[in-house]
Image: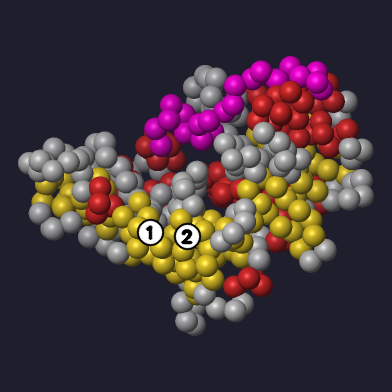
Amino acid sequence: MSKSRVIAAMSGGVDSAVAAGLLVESGHDVIGVTMKMYSQTRPSHAKSCCGADDFDDARRSANTLGIPHYVLDFEETFRRNVVDRFVTAYRTGRTPNPCVACNNFVKLGALRRFADRLGARFVATGHYARLVHAADGPRLFAGDGAKDQSYALAQLTPQQLDGLLLPLGELHKSETRTHAARLGLAVHAKADSQDICFVEGGDYRNVLDRAAPQTEPAGAIVTTQGESVGTHAGISHFTVGQRRGLPATHFNDGPRYVTQIDLVTNTIVVGREDELSSNALVADEVNLIRPDRFAGGPLRVRAMTRYRAPLNPALAAFEPGSATLRLDFEAPERAVAPGQLVALYDARSDEVLGAATISAALQ
């Protein structure tokens, strides 16, 4: 690949700093950019991100690497495309993927437009996934098994992937830290951020209360057989697969889980763990990275219905006359949650073929 101008997204962590460093070593013209996407309302902690310390760490890493560094205010873009979508999803009984939305609309959306203005061919991130720029289009593959983040990138279009570089794609996390120490980066031992950046304290309900304070209508909690076992104060407090926070029941055959959230009747349905499984799903917002693979009709794939879930063999087919995708699983899939991304992998390799947003689970 020819040497190009690259905008390196630098969060202040070790992964993005090493990604920028490896690009510098390979001869690219690298510009570091830290995106201000969210203003914290409480002090940051070791596993959070987007705090003032992270901006300082990104600046110091860029200085060590000898590259220019800028902080861009993307708060409004982030609020509109990530936080608002997050709130709407929970208010309507769905379980959102904020990191997927951030990749699509902010990092490969707003930041991509900034890169275009600077004449940069690529945006680079510190994701652990492999990306091959082939003559007939980009090819996305899973990365390090323990840290693989290809799921979070599976909704990117081929056009977005064409302008992306993933320098850590062939590395394991331990190798990244070794590179960080070799490059003299002070963040080489910095702990990974694990929380969603705008979910302070780990409770997403606080985000809902701040972003859209409102009183939700109460409703019934019923079993899969229709028996009432309690009431709830709003469907946004629940997600499919949830066990905690459910009312005590008289059943003695094991715990109950949320199996369905019925927006129309404002009802939470609970059932046994074996009732949590689905044989199929339908999904919309379909993105095909390899549309040619689906041109011949139903295709055998392996599906991941939530981040780091085991891959489940399935048959992928488009509903006649629509853009709706249907997946029929070889083995029942646990806790299929509407609103979550389902990533589609090749049946025999680690290649990502596309993704879609789950709209309903089918028994």
Q: Outermost residue, front direction?
A: 348
State yes or no: residue 203 in magenta.
yes
| Mark before the other along the chain sequence, 2 or 1 | 2
Residue in view at x 66 percent, y 72 percent: 292
Please, which colouring scheme is shown?
secondary structure
Secondary structure under badge 2?
strand
Whether residue 282 is visible, yes or no, is no
Q: Which mark is residue 331?
A: 1
Residue in view at x 16 percent, y 52 percent: 222
Q: Amino acid at mark 2?
A: Pro
Q: Which mark is residue 313?
A: 2
Secondary structure under badge 1?
strand
State yes or no: residue 88 in magenta.
no
In the visual, does 358 lie left or right of 19?
left
Residue in view at x 61 percent, y 65 percent: 288
In the visual, does 324 lie left or right of 250?
right
Residue 140 is situated, as x and y percent measured from the top left of the image, at: 68, 54
Residue 218 is situated, as x and y percent measured from the top left of the image, at: 20, 48
Using a 10 Å C-alpha cutoff, classify the residue at mark 2 as few (fewer than 14 neighbours), some (14 to 19) or many (20 or more): many
Q: Amino acid at mark 1?
A: Ala
So how many labels did they put on this image? 2
Q: Which mark is residue 224?
A: none
Residue in view at x 59 percent, y 73 percent: 294
Residue 44 is situated, as x and y percent measured from the top left of the image, at: 54, 21
Please, is residue 51 above or below residue 35 in the view? above
Discs 2, 1 touching: Cβ within 8 Å: yes
Residues rendered magenta in the picture: 181-204
Whether residue 157 is visible, yes or no, is yes
Question: Mark 2 and mark 1: span between their CA atoms?
Answer: 8 Å
Residue 64 is situated, as x and y percent measured from the top left of the image, at: 83, 21
- The quadrant of the picture occupied by the C terminus is bottom left
